[in-house]
């Protein structure tokens, strides 16, 4: 049976030196609004609107949609410039790993908090293969993007692997019932207890090739 490999865009595939997450923090800091303590660690990798609402104290609710939408719009504008800059580079070995997986008959997709159109453009700019970017009615950490791409690929939960570095992607994978969840990097002890990690790696190349 073919497997579906969903790889988080920023981290495993694209090295941004922390710029995408830092942009969210910068926009919020510049707003002068008080931020909920500790929320930044829990919202890394989440859709901008969700992350902003949570860090402002709304826990993802629609407490002040006008403020959230204004700040979200600024984040997306800066992300667009960032995706076009030299700050984002292809991770060594990522392209070769994807090609091998595809050659082995597996399906590879991308899961990210970056809007699908921008994510696809970023893949092209850094020289990665064109891959389907998971999208859904609700963004991360909701499971919609992962469930949608699993359905489209015709691959069941037990044949799906998610490789991620952020809590939002891993939380979404947990809610989607993904059987194999691989964490890239060390993660944060504060949220690690919330997700059933099946393996840890430091680079994508540590995942075994198709046999």
Image (cartoon, rainbow, N blue to C red):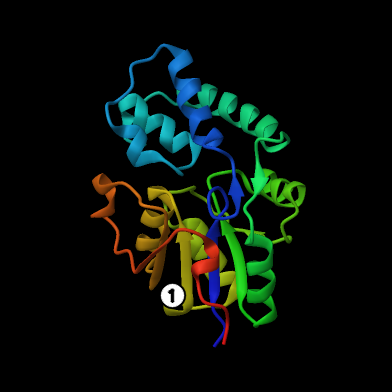
Please tell me how crowded label 1 is: few (under 14), some (14-19), or many (20+) other residues with Cα within 10 Å.
some
Q: What residue sits right under mark 1 in the picture?
A: 157
Q: Position of residue 202 (x, y in %)?
A: 45, 58
Q: Split into 4 quadrants, where in the image is the C terminus?
A: bottom right
Give the SS element for disc 1: helix
Asked if one can make out residue 106 in the rendered structure from this viewpoint, the answer is yes
Q: Position of residue 197 (x, y in %)?
A: 33, 64
Q: Give the residue displayed 61% in from the left and 78% down from the top.
A: 106
Q: Position of residue 132 (x, y in %)?
A: 66, 61
Q: Nearer the viewer, residue 53 or 41?
A: 41
Seen in the picture, residue 143 relative to 96 is either above or below; the reply is: above
Q: Disc count in the image?
A: 1
Q: Give the residue displayed 73% in from the left and 60% down from the top.
A: 130
Seen in the picture, residue 112 relative to 161 is either above or below; the reply is: above
| Left or right placement of residue 177 versus residue 108 in this view | left
Q: Give the residue displayed 41% in from the left and 64% down from the top.
A: 182
Q: Nearer the viewer, residue 126 or 137?
A: 126
Snapshot quadrant of residue 39: top left
Q: Position of residue 8 (x, y in %)?
A: 53, 55
Q: Give the residue displayed 46% in from the left and 44% down from the top.
A: 45
| Left or right placement of residue 90 versus residue 163 in this view | right
Q: Split into 4 quadrants, where in the image is the N terminus?
A: bottom right
């Amino acid at each position: 049976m073919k497997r579906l490999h969903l790889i988080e865009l920023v981290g495993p595939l694209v090295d941004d030196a922390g710029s995408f997450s830092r942009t969210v923090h910068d926009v919020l800091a510049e707003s002068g609004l008080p931020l909920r303590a500790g929320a930044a660690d829990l919202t890394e990798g989440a859709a901008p609107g969700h992350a902003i609402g949570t860090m402002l104290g709304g826990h993802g609710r629609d407490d002040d949609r006008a403020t959230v939408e204004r700040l979200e719009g600024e984040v997306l504008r800066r992300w667009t410039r960032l995706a076009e800059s030299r700050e984002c580079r292809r991770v060594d070995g990522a392209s070769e790993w994807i090609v091998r997986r595809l050659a082995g008959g597996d399906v590879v997709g991308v899961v990210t908090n970056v809007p699908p159109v921008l994510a696809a453009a970023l893949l092209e700019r850094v020289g990665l293969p064109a891959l389907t970017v998971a999208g859904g009615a609700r963004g991360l950490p909701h499971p919609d993007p992962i469930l949608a791409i699993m359905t489209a690929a015709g691959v069941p939960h037990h044949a799906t692997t998610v490789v991620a570095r952020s809590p939002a992607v891993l939380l979404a994978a947990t809610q989607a019932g993904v059987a194999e969840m691989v964490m890239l990097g060390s993660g944060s002890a504060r949220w690690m207890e919330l997700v059933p990690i099946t393996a840890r790696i430091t680079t994508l190349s540590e995942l075994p090739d198709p046999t």
